[in-house]
Structures are given as C-alpha cells and as structure tokens.
Image (cartoon, rainbow, N blue to C red):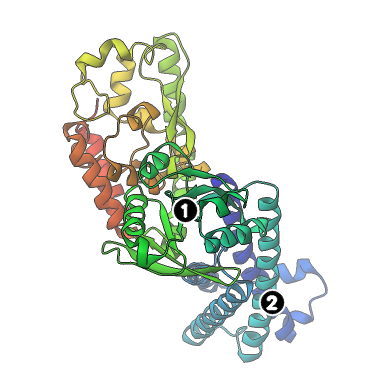
Amino acid sequence: MIKQRNILLKAYKLFDVSIMVFSFALATWITNPQLNGLDSLGEFLSVRIKLINFFLFLGMMLFWYIILNSFSLYKHKRLTSRWKELFDIGKATILGTFLIFITAELFSIEVIHRSFIIIFWILSCSLMIASHLIIRWFLEWIRRRGRNIRYMLIVGTNSRAVDFAKKIESQPELGYRIAGFVDGVWQGIPDFQKSGYKIVTDFKNFPSYLREEVVDEVVISLPVKSQYKNASKIAAQAQEQGITVWQLPDIFDLKTSKMRAGSIEGVPLISSYKGEMHGWQINIKRSADIILSGLGILILLPVYFISAAAIKLSSPGPIFFVQKRLGINKRKFKMIKFRTMIPDAEEKQDELEGLNETDGPVFKIKKDPRITPIGKILRKLSIDELPQLFNVFKGDMSLVGPRPLPIRDYNGFSEDWHRRRFSVRPGITCLWQVNGRCNTSFQKWMKMDMEYIDNWSLWLDFKILVQTVPAVLKGSGAV
C-alpha cells in the first residue's frame, strides 16, 4: 500500500512540474509573435536562451514545486472533497503565477507580460485540475480493487457507529476496511449483533489488540456523557501506540494531542494525534528521501561492489542479510543490510541470550562471536547499513526516523508508549544514532524516539543527518 502511494505521489509531483513547463512553453508560443513566425519545432528550439534566464526558469520551477507542496496537494485525499482539492489547486496556481510575474518584473524577462500571465494561469490551472481528477479517479480505482487500504477500528456499537461503518463500506473508493468493533457488555448488544458486524475486543483488552493487529485509525463512537471515562482511556491508549484517533462527533480533552478536522460523506470527524508528521513538510521529507537515497545509491556503487566482494571472499554465505522488520503502524517489510555475521547467526542467538549487554528487549553484544572479521570493519564504519538506501528509495524507510526493530524485539516491549515509535516511517539514523547508540539504555533510546516524533521538523532531520557523519566517522557506540 505505502509503496503504491509513494509511486503515485512521485507521478503527481513530476506531472505537475511538467504541466508548469508545458504551460510556460505554450503561453510563450501563443503570446510572442516573433516565435509564431518560426516554421518548425527545430527553429523554435534553436532560439538562443540567455544563461541567466535559464537559471531563473529553474528557480521558478523550484518555487512552483514548493508552493504546490505548501497547499498540501500531495497528501492523501480520502477525507477531502473534490471541491476542496480544486479550490486548493486554484489558490496554488494563482500564487505560483504571481511569483512568476514578480520574477519577470524584477529581471525584465521580455517574454513574460500580462497576456502571457493570463494564458499561463488558465493553462496551468485547467491542466492541473484535470490531472488531479484523473489521478484521484485512479486512486479510487485501485482502492476498489483492495489496494492502498487502511484498517479502521470502531469503538462503540450503538446505531450511530453501525451507520458510520455502513457509510464507510458503501464507499470502497475511500480505501477503508472495518477491522471490527470494540465495546463492553450493554443492553444494545443484541441489536448490534443483527448488523452482522463483529466485536473483536472489549475495553480491557483493547491495548493488546492494538499490539497484535494492524490498525491504522481508531474511530470512537461512544456517548461522552455516560462513557467519557472509557472513551478518554481508549483515545489515550491508541494515541500512546501512535495510532490516529477520530471522534464521532464529540471531542474530549487530550492535553498532549493536536487536532485536525475532516469528514466522510458529510459526517464530521475530528482527529487527535501526537507530533507534527503531517502536511506539506512530510511531502518534502519524502521527496528528499527519494532524491538523496537515489543519489547515495549511485555515488556509493563502488563501495557496494567492494563490500560485496570482501564479504563473498572472506566467508561463506550470502552477501546481504535480509530480515523482516516492523515499519509504520507495524507493517512488515524486508530490511537489507550487508551480512556481517556467520550465515546461521540468527539460529545461534538463543545460545547467547545470557551474554546480552543491553537492558530492555533488544539484543546487543559488543564482542559478538558471530561477527566475521570483515563484518567488524563494516560495522565500525557503518557500511553494513548502506543497502538500506534501497529501503528508503522504495518507501519502507526514511533517511531519518526511529530505527526499525526486529519482530523479536517488538514482542519484548512491556510498555505501550514505546509502541508510538511505530506511528512514523522508520529511518536509517535518528537521535539514538548520534547520541551514543549502543552506549544508551533502552529507556533513554525510547525517550529519544518520542522526542524526535513530538518535535519533528525538516530542520531537525537536517541537523540529525549532519550530526550522523561525525558519529559514523568516530564509530561511537557501533558494534
């Protein structure tokens, strides 16, 4: 699901920038008579372009891209109406066109004048609206076929909750699946059972259900007057594990949460969440992941080949170590590393449990006997982590984020607030990597992950990436 969405987001952005370029070229052709006199495409392309104008055009493309991101045109539109999206496109293209006009005035670009601006805006806005409607239709088509799905758990079994579930299921293009209902024993249960829906857990076992199952969103439909205590507790427990909470339709006080509003088929919803990982900034973060990981893969190809040859020649077994890890909201993915241990290292871990040198559920030994001689060098220089750039490029991971943990470590978690680290995409580096790594206690590690999530910004990601370089060179905390 996440991989498909990332591919579609790339298509959105690439196509929107292409629309800007196409509209610019067509408006130039229409509004400049000297270009209309050229008889062929070859003659048009042979027109000399000043170097400064070329760089100004690149700058305008960059500003256009930033403006489109700032209007949240690339976030998922499940809960956003078509008219709201079209209105946002109109505002974004007006602002982008205005900046092009200002640039032309400041740098005296002759081909950009008032008639050009009007035609450019009409072309860019209409083409972008058409493309977004087509892509929206394509997304809905994918969701109708069971892809790009989000799992929704509904708390409460009253008629309002049942009606809401039916509305969700009547709109398969939204891409939601009802995971089930949560409730205790009350007089309305016999009526609920007639609906055909299933209660998957009660209030007491609700946290355990979240630990074991894939749940993306929780919708609470409990009468606040009589069930405020249960509703507030449920919201806090879901929030503790980093799962989005929607209230239908009343709201209660979650002091550490932020709120945003939405609607499904006219039904108002309010979401409570922790941290700032949403909106246009997360789109820029993903764009940076794609660009930087792609460049990193290309630049580091010699390192990949040398490391692969060293591993293959020094010990029997595969070049890569591939292990299932838990990603966003506990989705499993295959994380790739250069193999630094003997081939049957995982099978021998049980024999070494008594030598574990860290607290908590994680397993670390500074002088692990399973590590090969070449593996020690790769780990010391953090070269073993480099194949994870492919995970970043695919969308399973980010450059910066809490480290993805093995399923074995997750099963050892004892506190639900630790699980909130799974509410964001895992990363190659984070605060833990630049603050001692294996020299840090498990509790402090988890607190640093929460600190990162709650205070996230693009600037924080940049600082962590910069601090990672000296941490890697010094090999601090590496095993």
Q: Give the residue type that dot 1 points to.
A: Glu
* Lateral position of residue 3 relative to residue 361, left or right: right
Decide which of 7, 346 is in the foreground and name it.
Answer: 346
Q: Is residue 270 above or below residue 84?
A: above
Instruction: Write the residue at 30% across / 66% down.
Output: 253
* Lateral position of residue 363 relative to residue 149, left or right: left
Q: Position of residue 363 (x, y in %)?
A: 27, 24
Disc nearer the start of the sequence (2/1): 2
Give the structural element (helix, strand or loop) at label 2.
helix
Say few, some or many: other residues with alpha carbon within 10 Å of mark 1 (under 14 / 14 to 19 / 20 or more): many
Decide which of 289, 31 is in the foreground and name it.
Answer: 289
Decide which of 226, 232 is in the foreground and name it.
Answer: 226
Instruction: Write the residue at 44% across / 38% down.
Output: 389
Instruction: Determine the CA span between mark 2 and mark 1.
Output: 34 Å
Q: Residue furthest front?
A: 187
Residue with the mark numbered 2? 126
Q: Is residue 390 above or below residue 170?
A: above
Q: Position of residue 367 (x, y in %)?
A: 21, 16
Residue with the mark numbered 1? 217
Instruction: Write the residue at 46% across / 69% down.
Output: 249
Give the structural element (helix, strand or loop) at label 1.
strand
Q: Give the residue type that dot 2 points to.
A: Ser
